[in-house]
Amino acid sequence: MKKGYLAIVLHTHLPFVKHPEEEFFIEENWLYEAITESYLPLLYNFYKLKNEGIHFRLTMSLTPPLSNMLLDDLLMNRFKRYINLRIALLEDLLKNEKDEKKRKNFRFYLERLKTLYEFFRTTLKGNVINGFKDLQNEGFIDVITCTATHEILPLETHRKIQEVQVEVGVENYKRIFGRNPRGIWLGECAYAPPVSEILSKYGIEYTILDAHGLINAKPTAFYGISAPIVSKDGVAFFGRDPEASKQVWSAKEGYPGDFNYREFYKDIVYEIEENKVKKYIHPAGFKVDSGIKIHKITGNTGLDKKELYDRTKALEMVDTHAGNYMFNRERQIEYLSSIMDRKPIVVAPFDTELFGHWWFEGPEFLATLMRKIDKYSEVIETTTLSEYIDRYPVMQVSEPAISSWGDGGYFRVWLNDNTDWIYPHLSVIGKRMLNLAKQFEKPKSKLQERALNMCAKELLLAESSDWAFLITVGSAINYATEMQRFHINTFNKLYKEILEDKIDETFLSYLEKKDSIFPFLDYRIFKEKR
């Protein structure tokens, strides 16, 4: 009889980025990279496990911004172009490359991309979300939702807008999966009252916090992070296990830094003559990563000293590391089970893009881990968070502590000297949206209704935590600042036009194509009920 559970949680999210006005747009590649390098490899490996008869369970979030992009015809057509251009580049490179070791790597990538594209085209019927649906319907994964645009709810000044963020996240999920979500991923795992009350109002059964959200709960969580607590509102809170997480996500101390794994920062686009790659990778005139990287980490050396990637050796290390991770979790569970009156659960949440995009061998690691646990472990089994609360419906009543999973454990990643200018604007346009919903209960024309709905979308998009995060970490800082300002300024432009009854229909039509998230959204959702 197994002594406890391992719950891998994959948080699958990207900010909503769509630029129909440009044929090629660099930041759209975030989506295409994630599909090619993370989502398809993960789903492909999960389908393999299913076909092998392996018992495995995971919890996966699918956020509303990402799900809307995965259902967007323009973006999906551009994704097909993205992956097929890389297939064509590899075929071209193989015609002229003489070095057999490089040819071996090119052949590996070519076969990989062709296999993944065929899997996307046939098994998934050209829709990544079909993979989530099928695996959930067959009980292998539990898909949870997220707040509408990954907002940090504790930094929101209006209770009604907090509710809308949750309500839209739930509605978006229901329209895709045809059922109510049981769990939710709070943007940045950020928690403070009255979030629990709001989650309960919209039927959410559980969520995940960083460890100190449970450790500092009141009263103290009796089981620490080894079992969930439940708030007085009836929402269960699971705690992230730092020990189980660090071994996987840390590039310095964890598995991804092994010298045999693929080097992320050395892309062939910077190694090959520009005329050989231009028409495939940067036809619009700017150079971007191809995703084809044929060197291994090698050691603490400069990029010019990296050795060629050996896929066979990398997979040997995957097997070793998966075995080591299982061993460590077994020891952890054995100890916890000896001091608990119920089976403990170890919750290990990660950003999905870690597996495949940042850590190239990550999808194979997860699949190998699931296979090993099912075949060989007598101590642990994998579970979803839903399954665990079904097994143990009686939980300690406790109020989680204010917390997030960012650096420092609270909100400074998103609220600091570089980002504090954002939140006064969000407060103002939030209040304006509430007033619009109250003032225009019955719009005078279809045009006005369209503008009001667009205001609602622009507010939600402005509330995304992604822009403040990118500004803080200095990644795509110019684009993030531009998008933050764009959504705020666009809301204010529409707001003024609505009040003056002078709506610029040409600009509105452009926005409806560009910011096409939530086609079902009705601005009246912001109307406060008496």
Image (cartoon, rainbow, N blue to C red):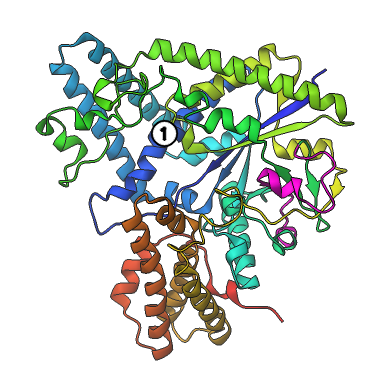
Residue at the left extreme, as displayed: 275
Quadrant location, the C terminus:
bottom right
- At 42% from the left edge and 33% from the top edge, which residue is drawn? 358
Whether 456 is drawn above or below 387: the answer is below
Helix, strand or loop under label 1: loop
Residue 213 in the magenta stretch? The answer is yes
Viewer-side residue, 408 vs 286: 408
**354 horizontally vs 179: left or right:** left
Q: Position of residue 34 (x, y in %)?
A: 41, 39
Residue at 51% in and 54% down: 413
Residue 527 horizontal/vertical position (percent): 61, 78
Q: In the image, is residue 151 above or below residue 395?
A: below
The image quadrant where one finds the N terminus is top right
Q: Decide if residue 58 is in sight here.
A: no
Q: Is residue 148 magenta?
A: no
Asked whether 270 or 251 is in front, the reply is 251
Can residue 99 be seen in this snapshot? yes
According to the image, label 1 marks what residue? 357
Q: Quadrant of residue 6?
A: top right
Considering every residue shown, the one lying at the far bottom of the view is 500
Q: Which residues are magenta?
A: 199-225
Q: Is residue 290 above or below residue 486?
A: above
Disc 1 residue type (three-letter): His
At a point 24% along the width and 15% down the height, the residue shown is 102
Within the image, what quadrant is residue 301 found in?
top left
Q: Alpha-carbon neighbours of circle 1 within 10 Å: few (<14), some, or many (≥20)?
A: many
Q: How far across and down, in percent of the image, does residue 89 sit?
A: 20, 28
- Residue 333 appears in which quarter of the rendering? top right
Residue drawn at point x = 80 percent, y = 54 percent: 231
Q: Nearer the viewer, residue 3 or 213?
A: 213
Residue 453: x percent and y percent? 47, 72
